[in-house]
Structure formats: C-alpha cells, structure tokens
C-alpha cells in the first residue's frame, strides 16, 4: 500500500468516520431533558480516587416531577484535587438550597446537571472510540482472511506406496 493511501485513510476517512459517528450518536440520544428544581438535603465530601488525592462534593437531593416526589443520593456538585477548595465550595451549597437539575423524559429517576443529560459527552466518547472499533474489525477481517487463505490454495499431495516386484 502506498503512502498516499495511508494519508487518505488517516487524514480524510478517519475524521469523516468520527464526525459521522458523533452526529449519529447525537441524533440517537436526542431527547430534551426536563428542567426540574431540586432541594439539597445534605452534602458530603468524599475522596473520589484512591491513591491520587481528589475530592468530590456530593449532595443528597429531593425533587418533584409530574406530581411525584423523588430523591437522589450522591449527586456530584464539585470536584477538585485540593480538599480545602472542596470544603470552601461546600459552604456555597447549604442545606435547603435550590438548584436546577435535568431529568430524563422517560425516566425521571435519571438526572443530570447538564441540560442535555450529558449526551454530548457520550457522543464524543463514541466518536473517539469509532476508529478503535474500525481497527478491531479490520484486524479481525485480516486474521480471518489469512486463516482461510491456505484452505483455498490447498493442494493435496498423494503418496502411492511402492509396489514390490517379485
């Protein structure tokens, strides 16, 4: 394969594939999440990564949608490596404070702080992983082709036993 084909695949085909997967993923995930008011019941600071210091401010909240009450535990409000900054941020989220969350239209127990329910993040991940899927499929086809090739060109060698003359 010439270097021009590698350039074509690398700089044209793969970016087009990634953009296509991104657009398709956005369309498949396209449902507007419903804006909902929630109330903070409690907050806690937890270590979010063992080994590497990182701290998350987590909240337990309650909210209502369509006349039904829901509660959610462990909503991540803030994340930082410095515990002191996380403690300072916790002071800005007192018990009883109201915040806006977004609930999935079909599943009100699924919530997000992002208005799109983090679907753009999922679409980006799908787009980034699409070349890897293409490589795995290509490798599988390559191996399958190599594995089948000897069968197609299989020529049988037959040996006849020597006849003894008397």
Image: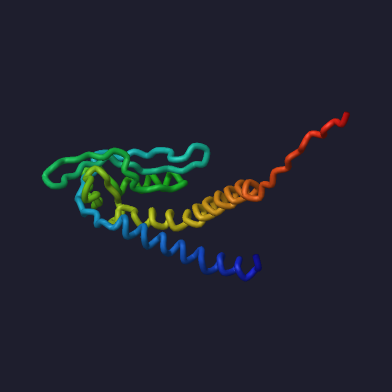
Question: Front-most of 102 and 75?
Answer: 102
Q: Position of residue 130 (x, y in %)?
A: 47, 56
Q: How many marks?
A: 0
Q: Tell me the residue at 66%/50% (across/down).
A: 153
Name of the residue lying farthest toward the top: 166
Q: Name the quadrant of the N terminus.
A: bottom right
Q: Looking at the image, what colour scheme do you see?
A: rainbow
Q: Tell me the residue at 27%/45% (across/down).
A: 110
Q: Position of residue 6 (x, y in %)?
A: 61, 66
Question: Front-most of 115 and 37?
Answer: 115
Name of the residue lying farthest toward the right: 166
Name of the residue lying farthest toward the bottom: 4
Q: Quadrant of residue 40?
A: top left
Q: Quadrant of residue 120?
A: bottom left
The answer to whether residue 7 is left or right of residue 120 is: right
Question: On screen, 165 above or below 151?
Answer: above
Question: Front-most of 141 and 103?
Answer: 141
Q: Position of residue 36 (x, y in %)?
A: 20, 51
């Amino acid at each position: 394969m010439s270097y021009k084909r590698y350039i074509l695949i690398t700089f044209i085909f793969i970016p087009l594939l990634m953009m296509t997967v991104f657009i398709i993923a956005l369309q498949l995930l396209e449902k507007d999440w419903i804006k909902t008011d929630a109330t903070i019941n409690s907050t806690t600071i937890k270590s979010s990564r063992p080994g590497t210091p990182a701290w998350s401010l987590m909240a337990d909240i309650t909210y209502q949608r369509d006349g039904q009450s829901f509660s959610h535990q462990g909503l991540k409000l803030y994340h930082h490596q410095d515990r002191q900054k996380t403690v300072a941020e916790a002071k800005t989220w007192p018990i009883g404070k109201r915040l806006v969350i977004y609930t999935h239209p079909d599943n009100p127990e699924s919530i997000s702080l992002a208005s799109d329910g983090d679907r753009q993040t999922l679409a980006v991940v799908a787009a980034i992983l699409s070349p890897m899927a293409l490589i795995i499929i290509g490798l599988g086809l390559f191996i399958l082709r190599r594995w089948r090739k000897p069968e197609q060109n299989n020529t049988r060698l037959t040996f006849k036993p020597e006849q003894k003359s008397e």
